[in-house]
Amino acid sequence: MNHDDIEGFQQRMTGLCELYDVRLSDARTELYWSALSDISIPDFDQAIRAHVQDSDRGRFFPKPADLLAGAAPDVDLRAAEAWRLVVENAGRFQRAEFADRLIHAVLRDLGGWARIGRAPERELGFLRRDFVGLYARHAQHGVPYDVPQSVAYASGYAGPPTDTIPMIGREAEPERLTRDDLRLLPGGRG
């Protein structure tokens, strides 16, 4: 979520408070925002549904950890979707911001976005394996504090200039990949 999502976040938190007859202070609401701001609104909706429908935990107002657990789709599917976005958009922009900030951390650790965009076809399988492994590690530990807000394709890149930094992966309701889709991605084996 980003600052444009604050109103939607507050509406959903208000709904949870009404459902569980709980009042949240401003400080507690800020803590929830801080803990949950790395997930998207659709994932937040999924997390709320999962919590409310859980016959054990759903009897109590959710802690941030409960919502994070419910929001996290299978890490392999998330990594595959992230890989698809990175490969599809490699070389299209001088600089971009991915809605999933874990991608920024993985690209930094892999040596940059251009490394993937410039890789020969025969190396994509290896890069995909490394990307997925790093993504899983970062998903487990969270977005590192020193990850930049946007990523550059390459220094000296002579692609089309942009006045604004495009957001990648921020569709209203992104299409979710299934396990069958994994083998169709560049470098994928399923």
Image (cartoon, rainbow, N blue to C red):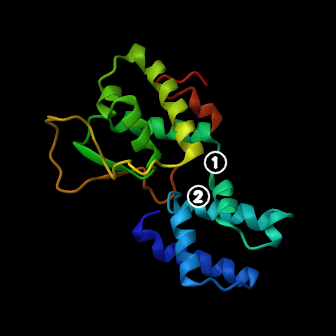
Query: Neighbour class for label 1 at 10 Å: few (<14), some, many (≥20)?
Result: some
Residue 15 lies, in percent from the top left, at 65, 80
Q: Which mark is residue 73?
A: 1
The kind of secondary structure element at disc 1 is loop
Is 96 placed left or right of 50 in the picture? Answer: left
The kind of secondary structure element at disc 2 is helix
> Which amino acid type is marked by label 2?
Asp
Residue 151 lies, in percent from the top left, at 30, 44
The correct choice, above or below, for 172 with respect to 104 in the image is below
Picture residue at 50% right of the left edge, 29% below the top = 185
Q: Which mark is residue 45?
A: none
Query: Neighbour class for label 2 at 10 Å: few (<14), some, many (≥20)?
Result: some
The correct choice, above or below, for 32 with respect to 43 in the image is below
Asked whether the beta carbons under mark 2 and mark 1 sit within 8 Å of each other, the answer is yes
Labels 2 and 1: the sequence-earlier one: 2
Is 117 placed left or right of 181 in the picture? Answer: left
Q: Can residue 177 be seen at all in this image of the molecule?
A: no
Picture residue at 63% right of the left edge, 56% below the top = 71
The correct choice, above or below, for 72 with respect to 53 in the image is above
Q: Residue furthest top?
A: 122
Residue 58 lies, in percent from the top left, at 80, 68
> Which amino acid type is marked by label 1?
Pro
Is 120 placed left or right of 50 in the picture? Answer: left
Q: Residue furthest right?
A: 55
Q: Quadrant of the C terminus?
A: top right
Is 106 placed left or right of 24 in the picture? Answer: left
Check disc 2 and report the residue beneath it: 43
Residue 184 lies, in percent from the top left, at 53, 27
Q: Can residue 38 be seen at all in this image of the molecule?
A: yes
Picture residue at 75% right of the left edge, 80% below the top = 20
Q: CA distance from mark 2 to mark 1?
A: 8 Å
